Amino acid sequence: TKQLLTVDGLKVSFQTRDGQNQAVRGVSFHVGAGETVGIVGESGSGKSVTAKAVMGLIAPPGKITEGEIRFQGEDLGRLTEREWRKLRGNRIAMVFQDPMTSLNPVKTIGFQMAEVIRRHRGLGKKEALQEAVDMLRKVGITEPERRVKQYPHEFSGGMRQRVMIAMALSCNPELLIADEPTTALDVTIQAQILDLLKQLKEESDTAVLLITHDLGVVAQVCSRVVVMYGGMVMEEGTVEDIFYRTGHPYTQGLLRSLPKRVGANRERLVPIEGSPPDLIDPPPGCPFQDRCPYAFGKCSELPPAADLGEGHRSLCWLVQDKSTLKEALGEEET
Ligand code: SF4
Ligand code: MG
């Protein structure tokens, strides 16, 4: 597939009173045209900061210190603020965790949707409102003609997120970035929103970059996964690689802390003990060393990225020798 988005060696840091917080420390990945890629990690892993960098939304005291972000071959680091504004919403759209913060409480849903549609597509007022009605219907909101006249507080959380998704997609973006789009919703509504995303994906060729702390969410929508920890990519691969050919102790930890949503045999949840590294003064070596059950002497040095085949890669010393990895990760399974 043709690469739509390429992030190469991205570093982002934030100036704080205590020093530079190195939130993103050399992240590389790509999203192909029409592809759905998940970035997964705990809070503080750098996943949201990475998404913000792709949207051109890193503002002081934050700064991109190194690396390159290319969108359809174009170096986004060279864009002016004006060019960014043209790109955002039009070719790259974004959906956030809390739709309430992105909606105006004193304007009707229809008005707000029509504004976006008019701005990007140059339609007249009436046509834009009709388009808003059609979009609401498309994202599964019943009685859209009545609904467009309502205000955001008259919508439930799940419905507001449907509105945000409709608005984001109304301009036919090439890339949709969704940052924890279902985190604030209860499990049933969450499943409905994920189904909606999947359905819309099938109907359009918009690529999706989904940011989440939940590997379960990734499994439902994504084809490829980037696992982040301590500002770095720990593992990258297809959903099958990540779930069935797990190549990193951190990924293994995430998988074991995953509640089983289906099936009768509920396994015990094992949260990963400890907390993420301090990124103001990160320890040299593997970012996961303090929490890794397999850490050994060598882990105080940063491992090189190992290629496990067909785009599956892992940043772990164990992977330098596949049999060592199997022994270590396999042994734990009972
Ligand atoms: Fe664990 Fe070492 Fe691998 Fe890091 S490099 S994940 S500490 S075994
Ligand atoms: Mg976040």
Image (cartoon, grey):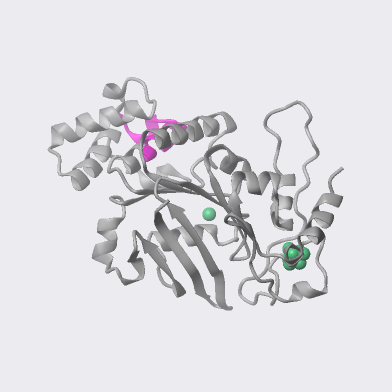
Residue 134, above or below 80: above
Start-end of magenta stretch: 150-165
Q: Nearer the viewer, residue 109 or 233?
A: 233
How far from the left and from the top, in percent, is residue 187? 59, 32
Q: Residue furthest top?
A: 143
Q: Nearer the viewer, residue 308 or 61?
A: 308
| Residue found 52% across the figure and 64% down from its top | 28
Q: Main secondary structure of the magenta part?
A: helix
Q: Residue 197 appears in which quarter of the rendering?
A: top left
How far from the left and from the top, in percent, is residue 325? 78, 58
| Residue found 54% across the figure and 34% down from its top | 190
| Residue found 31% across the figure and 26% down from its top | 147
Q: Residue 321 appears in which quarter of the rendering?
A: bottom right
Q: Is residue 16 left or right of residue 151?
A: right
Q: Residue 196 appears in which quarter of the rendering?
A: top left
Residue 280, above or below 84: below
Q: Is residue 258 left or right of residue 142?
A: right
